[in-house]
Image (cartoon, rainbow, N blue to C red):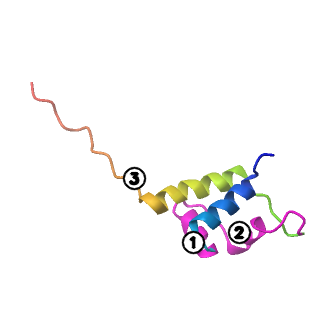
Amino acid sequence: MALSNNDIFKKLRVALKLRDDDIVHICSLVDFKVTKSEIGAIFRSEDHPKYMECGDQFLRNFLNGLVIYKRGPMPKKESKDVKKKS
């Protein structure tokens, strides 16, 4: 049996000890707007009437934000305007 996106998201939340506020902040790091009610709907059981499936885009944006949250933003690259000496 394969894990759903909801299962993966739940396991990451528990393993990293993240609260709803943390998840909202992590998603905001990649300009992905999410509300606490949407997060609550994702973490509900599948038979609950307000259950929401965690889509690929949601999980992808969360994971990209998590990289920034844990590692920090990528350093800016040097410009290649430096001339070579002949």
Label for residue 74?
Answer: 3
Extreme residue toward the top, this view: 86
Name the quadrant containing residue 79.
top left
> Cα distance, mark 1 to mark 2?
11 Å
Q: Residue at x 75, y 65 (%)?
A: 42
Which is nearer the N-term, disc 3 or disc 2? 2
Residue 40 is a magenta residue? yes
Q: Which residue is mark 2?
A: 39
**Mark 3 residue element:** loop
Label for residue 33?
Answer: none
Name the quadrant containing residue 73.
bottom left
Q: Are marks 3 and 2 in contact (CB under 8 Å)?
A: no
Residue 10 locus on image (x, y percent): 69, 63
Q: How many callouts does the rendering have?
A: 3
Q: Which residue is mark 1?
A: 22
Which is nearer the N-term, disc 1 or disc 2? 1
**Could you classify mark 3 by the number of other residues whose Cα lies within 10 Å: few (under 14), some (14-19), or many (20 or more)?**
few
Extreme residue toward the left, this view: 86
Q: Nearer the viewer, residue 82 or 60?
A: 60
**Badge nearest the viewer, 3 or 1:** 1
> Cα distance, mark 3 to mark 1?
20 Å
Which is nearer the N-term, disc 3 or disc 1? 1
| Stretch in magenta | 20-48
Residue 65 locus on image (x, y percent): 54, 58
Q: Is residue 58 above or below residue 1?
A: below
Residue type at mark 3 is Met
Q: Residue at x 63, y 60 (%)?
A: 12
Using residue 52 as the reference point, say whether residue 17 is left or right of it: left
On the rendered image, what quadrant is the C terminus found in? top left
Using residue 85 as the reference point, say whether residue 4 is left or right of it: right
Q: Are marks 1 and 2 in contact (CB under 8 Å)?
A: no
Q: Nearer the viewer, residue 82 or 45?
A: 45
